Structure formats: structure tokens, C-alpha cells
Image: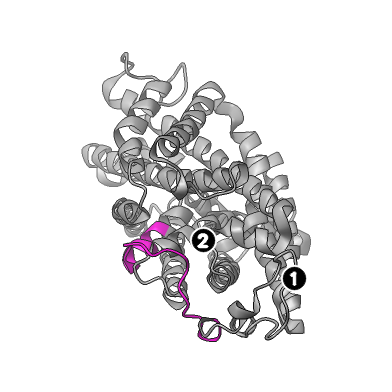
């Protein structure tokens, strides 16, 4: 019902017949009277070649990152029933905030999230948004490279990663070498294109890898259940121990913690407008359908991985479930040789997903930086400037991941607050400013309040060592 109210608010022409503000904070009369506004089928500036399935894949891969590996641990704290309920809740919240961005950007004929915020809140608001996107997304890029180095190499002096396991400690068993090799061989070719429709082909492959990863965990969970090796799981939260303190306060604490983890895991709002503009059929309703499909796909993967991981490891589930999924553990289920092959595919699938996700993150940071520093989108840059900026951003992420691998804590601390800024604060403020009904304004204010609460919880989680992404 709440979503329906938002739809009505956004669909209704804003301030029909009113004069525009001198500072450009509202639509002109011509825009307000445009026939595109009431039916919400107006097209955004620019039209690309990306198909519907390509847009769904790009948006899903934007959201699905390392945070999914924290979900089994999240479900272990609140039980399967509440975990699924919170997952569905965050699906609705994500679509709620995404629909605000999509509809207002299309209605105002804006080609970026930043230009939409600049129209409504001025240069200061746009700068705050762009800084939040750069801080969070660049931080996530750094974390992805650290995770890849951890999975493939490990840390000195033991080097327990996948490559040393099979090849021993060789000259190429180096965190910086593997990261540089993957960036040159895998990431750079994907960054050559200036068209998101090309990237969508890689995203589709990434989705297949993610489905394989989820199917692997579900299959192992099935084997564990069939052989009696499944861990003890809770359908509902244990009120005596939930949240580490039990009782109502413990339940509230655990619920807010899992809500914050899930909100981070579904974050995709910063890439909505570029993906919308890249679509061959970029009507607003088509983009909304693509958003719904990508959120549903993400939810299916998240629920499968969370339940399967929790079934396998119970209350011993690690914050990164792949740390539980060792060759030794899988050997107990299916034998050593099949276990080694399976782990190779699992680590490979996760690595490829993070690298493709990395490419989409570069796209977002590049656009945000160009708008912040140059006042124009990156697509208007000359080729030399475009690729130079791309190389600098990749180089920064690589250098920080190698020189300061322990920066993860700081990135999580700052990034978690920046994330809710562009995911919920600005969409909520947009709705509050433009809604014509009291219900719409209440929903907008509620989104901002929820964002503040999630930011506080995410910071507390990071400080206590429970950061998810």
C-alpha cells in the first residue's frame, strides 16, 4: 500500500501550471505540461543498445557483491523465518527508493543522479551526493581487490589461498602480482567500451556464475541433510540468546543489524540512471520492471545462499561463509578430488563476479567524479581523458589494496554511512520535497529516518567487528 501511494505521488504532475523557481529547483511549465509526465512513459536523455535482460544483469551485478557472503551469518542470528521476512522488507525498501530516482530523473529529463539532485538541492546537494558515491563505491572497489587477494593468495607467512594450496609458494604467489594480473587481463578489456550494453554481456556471465555458486551451496546443504551432517538451525530467533543479550532488546538489536547488512547487500541506486539511459527501450515503466526483476533475482540468490550456508554451518557460520567452505570441509561431504574441483569453481565464480562488479563500480565513480570536478558526465570526455581517468581510478584502488590491506575497517566505517546517503537519504528528501500528499511526505521523512538508523547500526557493527561489506 505504501508503494502504491508513492506511485501515485510520482505519477501526478507536479505543481501543474505553477511558475518555475528562478534557481531551477522545479520543472518549467513546458515540462510540467508535457504529455510524458502523467503516463510515466517518457524517455530519459540518450538511448543505448542494452536489452532488458542486459539491464537486469547490470543492475543485479551492481548490487550482488561480497555482502552476500555475510548473509548466512546474518540468518544465523535471527533464524530463517525472520531472515526471510527482513529480506523481503529490504526488497520493498530498495524498490521504493529506486522508483523515486528513476521516475524523477525521467520526468526532469536528467541523464544522471547527480544532475537530478543538483536541480532540486543545488550544487551543495549534488556535491554531497557525488562525494558519498565516490567514498562508498571506491571503498568497495578496494575491498573487492583485498577479498580477491585473500581468496587466491592469503596472507604472509602462511598463504592459505587457493593458488598456494595447489602450486605452493612460487615467485608469482604475491598479492600485488595476482591483483595486477587480473586487472590487466580481466578488468581492463571490460573497461575499453564506453557503452554499458557491452558490459551487460559480462554481467550476464556473472549472473550465471552466481547461480552456480548458489546451486553449489544448496547442493552441499542437501548432501549434508541427507547424510545427517547438517548443523542445527533455528527457524525462529532464540529469545534467550538473540542479539547476544536475549529478550526484546536483543531481538531489536539483531533485527536492526541484519536489516543494515541486507540494505548494504541490495545497494544499486547509484547506477540506476546510467543503466536506464543505456537501455534500447528506456521508458520509465521498462526500467521499473528491470529494477523489479533484478531485485527479485538478487533476493533469490541471497535467500538461497543464506539458508544453505546456515544449514551447513549453523551457529559456527563465519561472517564470510567462504571461510567455512574449505576443501577440508567439502572433502568430508563428497571426497577430496571432487571437493578440490568444486572449490576451484566456487572461488573462481566469486572472483569473476567481484571483477565484473568492480567494472560497474568504476563506471559509477568515474561519472560521479566528472560531475563533481568538471560539471559534466564522463561520456562527454575526450577519449584520452576518459581512459586516463579510468586508469587513475583503477590504479588508486589497486595501490590502496596492496599497500594498506588493513584499510578494510576504515572503508567499512565511512562507506556504510555514505551508502545510506545516496540510497535512502536523497530519495527520501526528493519525495518529501515533491510529494503533494501528506502520505507521500511522511514516507519521504520515514526514508530519511530509516537511513539515519541504518547508518548508526552499520557504524556500530563495524566498530564491533561485524561489518558485512
Quadrant housing residue 113: bottom right
Residue, far top: 171
**1 vs 2, front mark:** 1
Q: Are marks 1 and 2 in contact (CB under 8 Å)?
A: no
Q: CA distance from mark 1 to mark 2?
A: 21 Å
Query: Is 284 situated above or below 186?
Result: below
Query: Is 42 situated above or below 259?
Result: below
425 left or right of 76? right
Q: Which class describes the residues within 10 Å of circle 2: few (<14), some (14-19), or many (20+)?
A: some
Q: Position of residue 452 (x, y in %)?
A: 75, 57
Q: State yes or no: residue 51 in magenta.
A: yes
Image quarter hosting the N terminus: bottom right
Image quarter hosting the C terminus: top right
Q: Position of residue 260 (x, y in %)?
A: 64, 56
Q: Residue at x 73, y 51 (%)?
A: 124
Q: State yes or no: residue 256 in magenta.
A: no
Q: Which residue is mark 1?
A: 21
459 left or right of 376? right
State whether residue 321 appears in this view: no
> As rendered, which of 398 and 71 lies closer to the eye?
398
> As rendered, which of 80 and 437 lies closer to the eye?
437
State whether residue 389 appears in this view: yes
Quadrant housing residue 449: bottom right
Query: Is 17 situated above or below 350?
Result: below
Q: Which residues are magenta?
A: 37-58
Dot 2: what SS? loop
Q: Which residue is mark 2?
A: 111
Dot 1: what SS? loop
Give whichever of discs 1 and 2 has the lower sequence position.
Answer: 1
Q: Position of residue 248 (x, y in %)?
A: 76, 64
Amino acid at each position: 500500500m505504501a508503494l502504491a501511494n508513492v506511485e501515485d505521488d510520482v505519477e501526478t504532475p507536479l505543481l501543474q501550471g505553477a511558475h518555475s523557481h528562478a534557481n531551477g529547483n522545479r520543472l518549467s511549465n513546458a515540462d510540467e505540461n508535457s504529455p510524458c509526465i502523467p503516463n510515466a512513459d517518457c524517455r530519459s536523455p540518450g538511448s543505448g543498445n542494452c536489452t532488458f535482460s542486459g539491464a537486469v544483469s547490470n543492475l543485479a551485478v551492481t548490487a550482488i557483491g561480497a555482502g552476500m557472503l555475510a548473509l548466512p551469518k546474518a540468518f544465523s542470528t535471527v533464524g530463517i523465518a525472520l531472515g526471510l521476512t527482513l529480506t523481503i522488507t529490504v526488497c520493498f525498501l530498495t524498490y521504493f527508493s529506486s522508483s523515486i530516482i528513476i521516475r524523477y530523473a525521467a520526468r526532469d529529463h536528467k541523464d544522471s543522479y547527480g544532475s537530478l539532485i543538483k536541480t532540486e538541492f543545488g550544487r551543495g546537494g549534488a556535491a554531497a551526493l557525488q562525494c558519498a558515491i565516490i567514498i562508498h563505491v571506491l571503498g568497495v572497489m578496494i575491498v573487492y581487490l583485498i577479498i580477491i587477494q585473500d581468496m587466491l593468495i592469503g596472507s604472509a607467512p602462511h598463504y592459505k589461498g587457493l593458488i598456494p594450496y595447489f602450486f605452493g609458494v612460487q615467485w608469482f604467489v604475491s598479492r600485488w602480482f595476482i591483483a595486477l594480473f587480473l586487472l590487466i587481463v580481466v578488468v581492463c578489456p571490460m573497461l575499453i567500451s564506453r557503452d554499458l550494453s557491452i558490459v551487460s554481456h559480462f554481467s550476464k556471465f556473472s549472473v550465471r556464475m552466481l547461480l552456480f555458486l548458489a546451486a553449489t551451496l544448496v547442493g552441499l546443504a542437501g548432501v549434508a541433510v541427507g547424510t545427517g551432517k547438517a548443523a542445527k538451525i533455528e527457524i525462529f530467533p532464540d529469545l534467550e540468546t538473540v542479539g547476544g543479550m536475549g529478550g526484546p532488546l536483543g531481538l531489536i538489536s539483531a533485527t536492526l543489524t541484519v536489516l543494515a547488512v541486507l540494505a548494504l547487500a541490495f545497494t544499486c541506486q547509484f547506477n540506476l540512471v546510467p543503466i536506464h539511459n543505456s537501455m534500447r527501450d528506456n521508458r520509465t515503466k521498462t526500467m521499473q520492471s528491470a529494477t523489479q526483476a533484478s531485485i527479485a533475482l538478487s533476493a533469490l540468490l541471497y535467500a538461497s545462499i543464506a539458508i544453505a550456508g546456515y544449514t551447513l554451518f549453523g551457529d559456527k557460520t563465519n561472517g564470510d561463509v567462504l571461510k567455512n567452505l574449505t576443501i577440508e570441509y567439502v572433502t568430508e561431504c563428497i571426497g577430496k578430488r571432487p571437493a578440490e574441483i568444486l572449490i576451484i569453481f566456487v572461488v573462481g565464480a566469486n572472483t569473476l563476479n567481484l571483477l565484473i562488479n568492480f567494472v560497474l563500480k568504476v563506471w559509477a565513480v568515474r561519472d560521479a567524479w566528472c560531475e563533481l570536478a568538471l560539471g559534466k558526465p564522463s561520456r562527454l570526455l575526450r577519449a584520452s581523458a576518459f581512459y586516463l581517468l579510468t586508469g587513475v581510478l583503477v590504479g588508486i584502488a589497486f595501490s590502496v589494496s596492496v599497500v594498506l590491506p588493513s584499510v578494510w575497517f576504515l572503508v567499512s566505517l565511512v562507506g556504510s554511512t555514505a551508502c545510506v546517503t545516496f540510497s535512502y537519504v536523497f530519495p527520501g528528501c526528493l519525495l518529501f520535497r515533491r510529494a503533494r500528499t501528506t502520505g507521500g511526505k511522511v514516507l519521504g521523512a520515514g526514508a530519511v529516518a530509516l537511513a539515519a538508523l541504518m547508518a548508526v547500526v552499520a557504524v556500530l557493527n563495524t566498530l564491533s567487528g561485524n561489518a558485512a561489506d
